């Protein structure tokens, strides 16, 4: 006979035991794998914020020049993509209850990715598009390894859900983004036909370049940017939210159809928007509205999840994330306004486009990532430091590993920095942009100090003894 | 099968299990309502428990912690942790103390 303890007063009748099979197959990547991506990403973020302060004209003037494109790729590839890919190696197995296909491939991808983005940013600044293409191929090979690794991991998922579909969509869009980026770099290269030998390979590249040159270069650049930002970053924010927000707030998805609709509409809207932006079609606004509808449905579901949550006050990590998501409202509105075909291209609309890109990359994506880093990094370090001590000694909670006050200070500094920088962009005032950049950098410094506190636990664990031992069991 | 009831010692076992925390929520697994039942069979202590969500990244750590904290107790030869998902965990399973710790609504 089995003795059942009245462990939880709310649990009546006693539970019927069903041994798990799913969770036993879950194995997250080793902590050093995602951590190296995150530390490299943080270095790029720090450099990027310093760049805004040192050269605020990259935001206060129109964005089609080599410095803006170099800085944008530093943020997009160096900071956001690096952290997102590192986090995916950790989160995809957790969210989908499976194992990562290969850690070795992920380690190689890190090398290709870092060499690729550093070289690309440097060569964009030099405006050497041939070398941008070469470094882009290195980065692209790394992305190929990433996509292959995540795709093979997805194939192991026993039960597909909206999270798996959104991740599959995201890796499809990042593949297309890289191809589009390489095509754009190719289009900007010219072949020296005066040279003695021109290889067949060079002629083939020239044919591709000629076909890409038919498109308006700014339209092609914007189409490429939307593929990456909406297809990869926003798609992942939407999809992964349906796992992480309920997990962190003790809630659950309230309406699976609503969640699925947001991902489907985002895919449809982006596919249409890509071609409309590329071809400068008046139908662009239709797909902008579809994307806005997808994000509105996502917001609707997120509010429902939060209303149903059982955890009381939200921690600062979640507040960062939710504030970032709230910025999708003005961003969608601005996206629709900028999609109006008859909108004249004036200096002001050019600055509006800068605001659109800035709010999308910094206000939404970066803000959300910083929030999630406050959940992921302490977990990784805690796991590497304390998991072997649990049950043997008193271990700290994740929130004990860093300063919540510093985290809150960083939140307000970032929010203020966003508003000040946005004002500076709208007014084309470099000094105001610089002040905003200082506030944004201040947040990065608070994050780095807090991550330093977390890392300190790795080298100097803070363990305490338990209470006196319990009596024997008869 | 000869099973030894341990009802008289449930407080002892629960008190020991309160040393195992979910570090994300900063609450121990007993007050979170994760522990469903405990049975003793010839020195083998079996704990049936769940987690707040399937695929919880802390799953191996928490199970390891349960084994650690109970295997050191006198009279316990071995500890088995049986992770179950039915019934699924719900915040209403938390104790009053757990709700106070987590600020559950």
Image (tube, grey):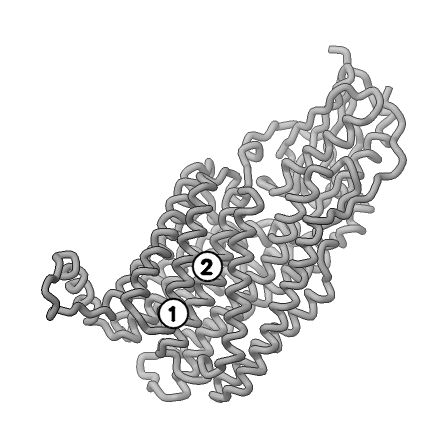
- Label 1 residue SS: helix
Secondary element at image label 2: helix
Quadrant hosting residue B21? top right
Which residue shows up at 52% across the image and 69% down it?
A47
Q: Residue at x 36, y 52 (%)?
A: A172
Give the x, y percent position of residue A277.
Answer: 31, 71
Q: Which mark is residue A81?
A: 2
- Which chain letter matches label 2? A
Q: Is residue A460 visible?
A: yes
Is there CB contact under 8 Å for labels 2 and 1? no
Q: Quadrant of the N terminus of chain A?
A: top right
Please report, as a chain letter, where disc 1 is located: A
| Residue A440: percent from left, percent from top | 59, 74
Please tell me whether residue B24 is drawn above or below residue A437 in the rendered image.
above
Location of residue A343 with respect to A175 vertically, above or below? below
**Gap between marks 2 and 1, in whole Å?**
24 Å
Q: Position of residue A265 (x, y in %)?
A: 40, 59
Quarter where residue B105 is shown: bottom right
Q: Nearer the viewer, mark 2 or mark 1?
A: 2
Residue B25 visible, this orientation = no
From this viewpoint, which residue is outermost toward the top? B1
Q: Can you identify the residue that label 1 sits on?
A: A288
Whether marks 2 and 1 lie on the same chain: yes
């Amino acid at each position: 006979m089995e003795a059942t303890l009245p462990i939880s007063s709310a649990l009546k009748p006693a539970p019927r035991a069903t041994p798990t099979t799913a969770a036993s197959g879950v194995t997250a990547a080793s902590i050093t794998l995602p951590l190296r991506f995150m530390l490299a990403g943080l270095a790029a973020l720090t450099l990027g914020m310093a760049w805004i302060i040192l050269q605020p004209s990259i935001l206060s003037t129109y964005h089609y020049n080599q410095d803006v494109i170099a800085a944008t790729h530093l943020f997009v590839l160096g900071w956001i993509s690096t952290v997102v890919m590192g986090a995916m190696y950790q989160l995809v197995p957790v969210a989908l209850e499976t194992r990562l296909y290969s850690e070795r491939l992920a380690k190689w991808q890190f090398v290709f990715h870092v060499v690729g983005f550093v070289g690309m940013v440097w060569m964009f600044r030099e405006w050497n598009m041939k070398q941008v293409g070469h470094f882009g191929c290195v980065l692209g090979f790394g992305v190929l390894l990433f996509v292959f690794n995540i795709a093979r991991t997805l194939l192991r998922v026993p039960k597909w859900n909206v999270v798996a579909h959104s991740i599959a969509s995201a890796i499809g869009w990042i593949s297309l983004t890289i191809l589009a980026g390489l095509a754009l770099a190719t289009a900007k290269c010219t072949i020296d036909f005066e040279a003695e030998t021109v290889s067949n390979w060079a002629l083939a590249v020239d044919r591709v370049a000629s076909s890409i040159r038919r498109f308006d270069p700014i339209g092609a650049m914007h189409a490429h940017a939307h593929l990456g930002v909406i297809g990869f970053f926003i798609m992942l924010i939407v999809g992964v939210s349906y796992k992480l927000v309920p997990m962190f707030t003790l809630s659950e998805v309230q309406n699976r159809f609503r969640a699925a609709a947001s991902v489907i509409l985002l895919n449809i809207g982006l596919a249409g928007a890509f071609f409309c932006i590329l071809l400068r079609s008046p139908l662009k606004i239709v797909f902008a509205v579809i994307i806005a509808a997808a994000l509105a449905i996502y917001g609707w579901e997120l509010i429902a999840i939060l209303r149903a949550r059982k955890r009381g006050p939200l921690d600062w990590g979640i507040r960062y994330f939710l504030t970032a998501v709230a910025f999708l409202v003005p961003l969608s509105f601005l996206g629709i306004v900028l999609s109006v075909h008859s909108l004249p291209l004036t200096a002001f609309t050019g600055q509006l486009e800068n605001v659109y890109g800035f709010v999308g990359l910094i206000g939404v994506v970066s803000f959300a990532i910083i929030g999630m880093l406050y959940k992921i990094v302490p977990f990784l370090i805690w796991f590497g430091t304390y998991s072997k001590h649990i049950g043997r000694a008193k271990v700290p909670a994740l929130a004990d590993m860093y300063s919540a006050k510093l985290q809150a200070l960083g939140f307000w500094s970032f929010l203020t920095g966003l508003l000040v920088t946005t004002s500076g962009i709208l007014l084309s005032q470099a000094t105001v942009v610089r002040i905003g950049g200082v506030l944004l950098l201040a947040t990065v410094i608070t994050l780095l100090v807090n991550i330093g506190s977390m890392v300190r636990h790795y080298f100097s664990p803070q363990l305490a003894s338990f209470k006196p031992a319990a009596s024997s069991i008869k | 099968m000869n099973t030894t009831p341990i009802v008289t010692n449930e407080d002892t076992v629960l008190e020991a299990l309160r040393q195992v925390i979910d570090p994300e929520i900063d609450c121990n697994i007993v007050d979170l309502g994760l522990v469903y039942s405990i049975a003793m069979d010839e020195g083998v202590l079996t704990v049936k428990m769940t987690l707040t969500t399937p695929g919880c990244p802390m799953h191996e750590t928490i199970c390891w912690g349960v084994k650690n904290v109970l295997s050191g107790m006198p009279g316990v030869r071995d500890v088995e942790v049986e992770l179950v998902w039915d019934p699924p965990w719900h915040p209403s399973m938390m104790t009053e103390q757990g709700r106070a710790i987590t600020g559950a609504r």
